[in-house]
Image (spheres, helix red, strand yellow):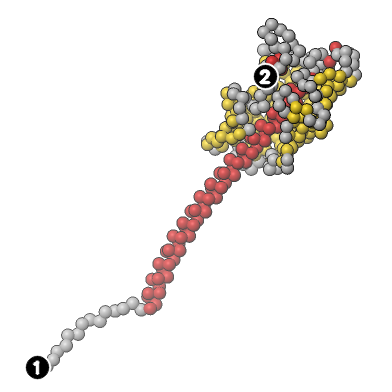
Amino acid sequence: MKNTRTLLPLRRTKSAKSVTLQTDKQLRIMNKKIFFSIASVALITVIFSGCKKLVNQNIQAASNSSVAIIAYNDVFEQLNAAVDSALDQKVVDTWKLSGSICADVTLSPLGSAFPKTLTIDYGTNCIGPDGTARVGKIIGVFSGNLLDESTTVEVSFEEYSAGQYTLSGTDSITNNGTDGAGNLVFSEVLRNTLVSWGTQKIRWEADFTRTWKEGSETNFATDTIGGTLGFAGLNDDVFELTGSASGNDSNTHPFILEIGTPLVVQTGCEYIKEGILVISPTNFNGGTVDYGTGACDKQATIEVDGEVFNFTM
């Protein structure tokens, strides 16, 4: 019997070239997945970083604007404390700033003639009743009595600082009379002003309208039934500010602002108590600052692109 052998069909094996092609294809697919994963992460990082930078830029401008507004509002309050009566009725040319034992006020000339130059000299370290240390001088040239319509006051500074903030530039104040409710209204034009502290500084120019809502009829010397004699006669002063400003923040980035709802400031409170401010940093989306509803605190919020963030003045 012949031995027979069953021949099985030969299995075809992949050539080395085929295996290489398949491996290359798998690597390309894997590389694409890795690329798109990295790209997605990078895109998310860029978006998040951009949003963070946008918010930070708005908060920087808002915080710096708050500092400048409060700093120059305090200048008006210091002048008001110095002018405790009509300047043309003064019989002495030197007196102490209301409530202070270290700040000297001088007036030149005495008599009915205007203009008059009023200088508040804080010396080298005068701590006021509000606990703020002031140095240097605030100088105001008055064309008439502060509370008389059409009076102008040209304010300048001589090495002046309040607390950690040093101020310079000019502040032009004009008494525009009263509004329909009988409130005194002033316009203020701030030019070439600079607020600096440490290595930081804010360049600032503004056109504001100041409405004296409460307290214009009392001062430190007022003695009425109910007792407003002393600080109560100053700290009852409430002002509303409207208008616009522009400048560079402490990172040298330019911005503009508009007061949307009047800002409320009160003598004796070192913060903006309420109001709405619209901030527009150059090349960034704008933000809306809300100072609250009347509490004297340093908390505020800012809304940027529909999201609300807390910040400290």
Q: Earlier in the sequence, mark 1 or mark 2?
A: 1
The numbered dot on residue 119 is none
The x and y percentages for residue 79 are 78, 22
Q: Amino acid at mark 2?
A: Val
Mark 1: give few (<14), some (14-19) or many (20+) Cα within 10 Å.
Answer: few
The x and y percentages for residue 152 are 81, 21
Q: Nearer the viewer, residue 248 or 180?
A: 248
Q: Farthest residue to the bottom: give it.
A: 1
Is 249 situated above or below 71? Answer: below
At a point 70% along the width and 35% down the height, the residue shown is 246
The x and y percentages for residue 164 are 72, 35
Question: So how many labels did they put on this image?
Answer: 2
Foreground mark, 1 or 2, reads 2
307 on left or right of 58: left
Looking at the rendered image, the quarter that the N terminus falls into is bottom left
Q: Farthest residue to the left: give it.
A: 1
SS state under label 1: loop
SS state under label 2: strand
The residue identified by callout 1 is 1
246 on left or right of 37: right
At a point 80% along the width and 13% down the height, the residue shown is 85
111 on left or right of 131: right
